[in-house]
Image (cartoon, helix red, strand yellow):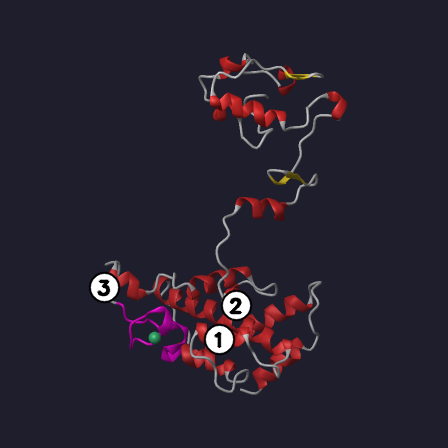
Amino acid sequence: MFWFDVWTDLGPLIEYIGDGDPRQLRIPRGAKVAYAVSDMGWSLPAARSQRVLDLHIKLSSLRLPIAAHGPDRFEWMRDPNISVGIFSSANTWKLLRQPSPEVPWHPLSWFSEGVPRYGFIQWLALRGRLPTRDKLYRWGAVASSTCLLCSLEEESHSHLFFRCNYSTHVWHRFARYIWNLAPLDLHATEAWIRNPGNDQSRNRCLIALILLQCSVYLLWSERNTRIFRGVTSTIDSLCGKLNAMVRNCILSLLGSSRRIDPALLADWYTIVLSR
Ligand SMILES: [Zn+2]
């Protein structure tokens, strides 16, 4: 449709020209592009406004859409001037989105072997966007900001991950066999993972990523379970769940088509048995 389809980079011409002005070009609202073109060129009246003159200039720069130039078809455009022919969801996404600066901690949340559900919670935690009780208290939504895991200090992101007595025990139970001195918080872990040192194997780094993601998810779940269901897990019980979560992640990776070192599970067992 001449007026309503996007067939130039000006967008729908009804919007470009203005809804009241199609009469200027003497082209009916329901006309196709072919109505305005012949083998000799565009069949448009002389321009009586700058906008229509600009449209003339634009159309004169296009290849004439006539049968001699091939059949009418849709084309996927990588940018306004480059046709790629084949649709690509990746290219389309890049075209549509507004890219933001890359953040240094993204490998912690978004790595190909990670679990998206866990990664999402970790992403919120790294951005400080979980509804922790210090925030809820400031908003007047709860009567106390005290941490539900230790009942000793205010619940904040830095407290939950991992300065809280309860969280520290769960985190260190496994982390101390990956790090001689386990990182105290998410951002310190991120710094290590970005620069682990030459003596660290890929398996060790991957286990560190999985362990961190599972720990954050499980501690946040434990906090929510205490609030919404009134059920409390002991440190030993939560460590058992964490072990099972990490093991299941590794087993699912080994059962997938990814290139994973078969020794990954044995490396995890070595950590577990070292406890
Ligand atoms: Zn606490």
In depth, the one of 74 and 161 nearer the eye is 74
Q: Position of residue 221 (x, y in %)?
A: 43, 66
**Is the CB atom of the residue marked by disc 3 within 8 angstroms of ligand 1's nearest atom?**
no
Q: Are marks 1 and 3 in contact (CB under 8 Å)?
A: no
Q: Which residue is mark 1?
A: 189
Indicate which disc, 3 or 2, sits on the residue closer to the N terminus.
2
Indicate which disc, 2 or 1, sits on the residue closer to the N terminus.
2
Q: Are marks 2 and 1 in contact (CB under 8 Å)?
A: yes
Q: CA distance from mark 1 to mark 3?
A: 33 Å
Residue count near mark 2 (Cα–Cα under 10 Å), binned few <14, some 14–19, many ≥20: many
Which mark, residue 143? Answer: 3
Tell me where residue 82 sits by quadrant. Answer: top right
In depth, the one of 251 and 20 nearer the eye is 20
Which mark, residue 141? Answer: none
Indicate which disc, 1 or 3, sits on the residue closer to the N terminus.
3
Q: Position of residue 111 (x, y in %)?
A: 58, 64
- Magenta stretch: give its range: 145-166
Q: Which residue is mark 2?
A: 108
Label 1 residue SS: helix
Tell me where residue 197 sits by quadrant. Answer: bottom right
